[in-house]
Image: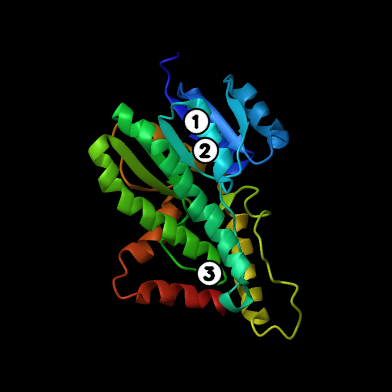
Amino acid sequence: MSDRQVALVTGTSGGIGLHTAVGLAAAGLRVVATMRDPGRADELRAAAGEAGVTLEVRALDVTDEAQATALVGELGRVDVLVNNAGRGSVATLEQLSTDDLRAQLEVNYVGVAVLTRLVLPGMRAAGRGRIVTVTSVGGAVGQPFADAYCGAKFAVEGLMQSLAPVVARFGIDVSIVEPGAVASEFVSNVAGDPAGRGPDDPYAELLAAYLRRAAGSFANAQPAPDAARTVVEAAVTATPRFRWQTSDGAQAFAGLSLADLDGSRVLGATTTWLA
């Protein structure tokens, strides 16, 4: 068996996940790159070929516990887990069904928790491991019309921050990576955009203001390869830490909340987004 570390990366059909998988392979790891539909792996394979690296593409829907269990069992060893797969949502609470809320939690929280739980026994037995979860600045700062998304990202950050000191006793390092706006297919994959609800929607004007601001943010978004470099660094660094941001802008934005003991800084900033 190869002595190369095995990295399992989720959500690799595009964006941060794609470039993270290629970057980890370039760093010398054996990369198992997963996505719901391996038929969408052409871009990943092309990027790997251009970088002169090889990786394995496997099917994985992170909400399918049986599939995740089978994959981890088949691999037998996972040294690095990168939880990158995610799903967005644009809607305020009154516009969200209970199914919408559950869908966000299933992908962004429960799926991450299940896959992390599956790799922990092997990491404990080995006395080492690295778990990196791509969250968002929305995991630190609640934002208008991101109620379900930010709720799920807050939850997964709480999970990982609680887990970190416990598994550290077994040689396992846990990190989260918080990107800001990133140029990727994530934007087009956002679910639940209620923009077409009509003129009687009491939230229509506020949503329009928010979407105008969001369009400006994503027009100046960080390139996905740049964001992925931070994820790769978090996965391979000899000096791991818990919290990483992928850009100066993400660091400043996350800092709004992390130093906001009474909540006024965040609400003071995000209220202006709806003007």
Please provide percent x and percent y for residue 268.
Answer: 42, 77
What residue would you read off at disc 1? Answer: 73
What residue would you read off at disc 2? Answer: 69
Give the CA separation, mark 1 to mark 2: 6 Å
Specify the quadrant of the image occupied by residue 159: bottom left
Give the CA separation, mark 3 to mark 2: 30 Å
The disc at residue 147 is: 3
Identity, as a three-letter code, of the amino acid under mark 3: Asp
Quadrant assignment for the N terminus? top left
Give the tally of numbered discs. Answer: 3
Q: Residues within 10 Å of mark 1 (few under 14, many from 20)?
A: some
Identity, as a three-letter code, of the amino acid under mark 1: Gly
Residue at 62% x, 29% y: name it. Answer: 57
Identity, as a three-letter code, of the amino acid under mark 2: Thr
Specify the quadrant of the image occupied by residue 55: top right
Q: Residues within 10 Å of mark 2 (few under 14, many from 20)?
A: some
Quadrant assignment for the C terminus? bottom right
Please provide percent x and percent y for residue 33.
Answer: 57, 32
Residue at 40% x, 29% y: name it. Answer: 79
Mark 3 or 2: in front is 2
Q: Which of the two residues, 78 or 206, is positioned nearer the viewer here?
A: 78
Regarding mark 3 in the picture, which secondary structure is present there?
helix
Name the side, left or right, on which 249 lies relative to 14.
left
